[in-house]
Image (cartoon, rainbow, N blue to C red):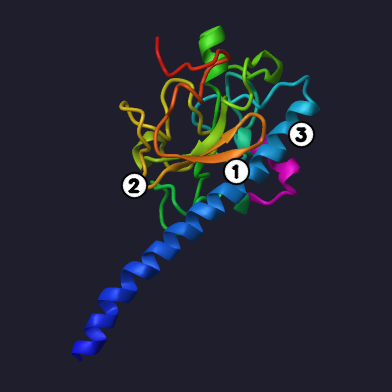
């Protein structure tokens, strides 16, 4: 019995670590696919990414924009596969047996430039390789259940007020040039959420 107990003490943390790594790897893979879909969408829409407009459920449209959630707008570019929008690391407020996306769309540049809902323009970015285009959500409290239109217009779903990942691990972030990086902190020397380099959330 003692041996079994010791094995459990050794094995359980190793299994959890492997699950964490697997979940983080899935986030990176999903975000790469989302990046391809977003860039394809922009290629067919005058270099504009989808517009997010608050809390919108699947199959619903925004009364402001008349559009569905950004996740639904890019679904044809994901081959109709909603599983790509499911994160294994993002905390969720959704009821058991249901899910809404574990990723947010980087909409802050549009808000900062126009002070409202809008489409981010790829060509306006000073540094696409530094501009946050999407990322994993780090807090279940930031979005209500059933929200398929998660965004970062006014605050970061991935980083807290100290610019640290809201997750216990680094947050997977997709940049506008299509690459994905795991970030423990938001580094203004190499990241931005606005059209200009090195910009953090501020008013």
* Circles 3 and 2 in contact, beta carbons < 8 Å: no
Q: Position of residue 99 (x, y in %)?
A: 49, 51
The quadrant of the rendering that contains the C terminus is: top left
Q: Is residue 78 magenta?
A: yes
Q: Which mark is residue 86?
A: none
Horizontal placement of 190 versus 34: left or right?
left
Q: Label 1 to label 3, Cα distance in Å?
A: 14 Å
Mark 1 lies on residue:
31
Q: Earlier in the sequence, mark 2 or mark 1?
A: 1
Above or below residue 93? Residue 193 is: above
Q: Label 2 to label 1, Cα distance in Å?
A: 19 Å
Q: Position of residue 77 (x, y in %)?
A: 75, 41
- Label 2 environment density (alpha carbons within 10 Å; few <14, some 14–19, many ≥20): few
The quadrant of the rendering that contains the N terminus is: bottom left
Mark 3 lies on residue:
40
Above or below residue 98? Residue 44 is: above
Assign a secondary structure to mark 2: loop
Q: Position of residue 91 (x, y in %)?
A: 39, 48
The residue lying at 34 percent from left, 47 percent from top is: 168
Q: Label 3 to label 2, Cα distance in Å?
A: 32 Å
Assign a secondary structure to mark 3: helix
Q: Is residue 125 magenta?
A: no
Farthest residue, direction bottom: 1
- Label 1 environment density (alpha carbons within 10 Å; few <14, some 14–19, many ≥20): many
- Label 3 environment density (alpha carbons within 10 Å; few <14, some 14–19, many ≥20): some
The residue lying at 28 percent from left, 82 percent from top is: 7
Image: magenta residue range: 72-82
Q: Position of residue 44 (x, y in %)?
A: 81, 27
Mark 2 lies on residue:
168
Q: Please name the predominant secondary structure of the magenta segment in the image.
A: helix
């Amino acid at each position: 019995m003692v041996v079994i107990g010791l094995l459990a003490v050794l094995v359980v943390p190793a299994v959890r670590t492997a699950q964490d790594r697997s979940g983080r790897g899935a986030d990176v893979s999903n975000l790469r696919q989302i990046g391809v879909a977003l860039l394809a969408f922009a290629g067919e829409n005058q270099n504009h990414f989808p517009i997010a407009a608050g809390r919108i459920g699947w199959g619903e449209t925004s009364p402001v924009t008349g559009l569905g959630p950004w996740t639904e707008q890019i679904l044809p570019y994901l081959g109709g596969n909603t599983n790509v929008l499911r994160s294994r690391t993002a905390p969720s407020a959704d009821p058991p047996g249901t899910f809404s996306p574990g990723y947010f769309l980087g909409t802050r540049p549009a808000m900062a430039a126009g002070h409202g809902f809008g489409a981010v323009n790829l060509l306006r970015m000073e540094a696409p390789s530094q501009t946050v285009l999407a990322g994993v959500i780090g807090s279940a409290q930031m979005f209500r259940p059933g929200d398929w239109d998660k965004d970062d217009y006014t605050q970061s779903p991935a980083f807290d007020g100290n610019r640290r990942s809201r997750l216990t691990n680094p947050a997977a972030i997709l940049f506008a040039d299509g690459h994905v990086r795991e970030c423990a902190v938001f580094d203004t020397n190499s990241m931005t959420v606005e059209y200009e380099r090195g910009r953090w959330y501020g008013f």
